[in-house]
Image: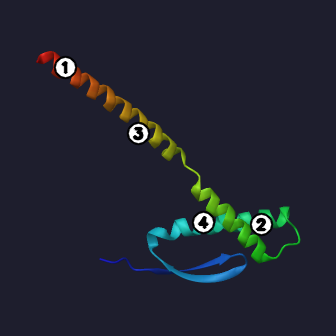
Amino acid sequence: MSQELIPVNIVLADRNYRLKIAPSDEEVVRRTIKTINEKIIEYKTEFAGKDMQDYVSMVLLWYATEQQKPTNNQVISDQTRQKIDKLNQLLDKALAGSESSSL
């Protein structure tokens, strides 16, 4: 069963947009828009004299770069995976040793 989309009005870089999104996505969309608009204001303060397209481009690059960074969960997952692999190797050695001693 498909979920009904709801219309939302957002303001991004001083422009209004009307989107249709899933109700479950509304909070994430609004939080993302807030983050982007705050970053635009920060860049306007830091890099005066640019136009809005420049600020939006800079924020887009920043946001895309942030999405590529590993999160703590990913780092922990990688560390956990390495530990599990090490335990598997130790178990394989232990099992191989017990098989040869029982023969």
Residue sitting nearer the eye, 1 or 65: 65
Q: Is 74 displayed left or right of 13 in the figure?
A: left
Residue 37 sits in quarter: bottom right
Please state the horizontal and vertical placement of residue 41, each as a whole percent of the image. Answer: 77, 66
Looking at the rendered image, the disc whose residue lies closer to the viewer, 2 or 1, is: 1
* Badge number at residue 98: 1
Distance between mark 2 and mark 4 Cα atoms: 14 Å
Looking at this view, name the residue that lies furthest to the right: 49
* Residue depicted at x 46% and y 41%: 78
Which residue is disc 4 drawn over?
32
Asked if residue 34 is positioned above or below residue 10 in the image, the reply reads: above
Mark 2 in CB contact with mark 1 (< 8 angstroms): no
- Identified by mark 2, the residue type is Ile
Q: Earlier in the sequence, mark 2 or mark 1?
A: 2
Asked if residue 20 is positioned above or below residue 57 in the image, the reply reads: below
Specify few, some or many for label 3: CA neighbours under 10 Å numbering under 14, 14-19, or 20 or more.
few
* Badge number at residue 41: 2
Q: Earlier in the sequence, mark 4 or mark 3?
A: 4
Looking at the rendered image, the disc whose residue lies closer to the viewer, 4 or 1, is: 1
- Identified by mark 4, the residue type is Thr
Q: Earlier in the sequence, mark 3 or mark 2?
A: 2
**The N terminus lies in quadrant:** bottom left
Q: Earlier in the sequence, mark 4 or mark 1?
A: 4
Which residue is disc 3 drawn over?
81
Mark 2 in CB contact with mark 4 (< 8 angstroms): no
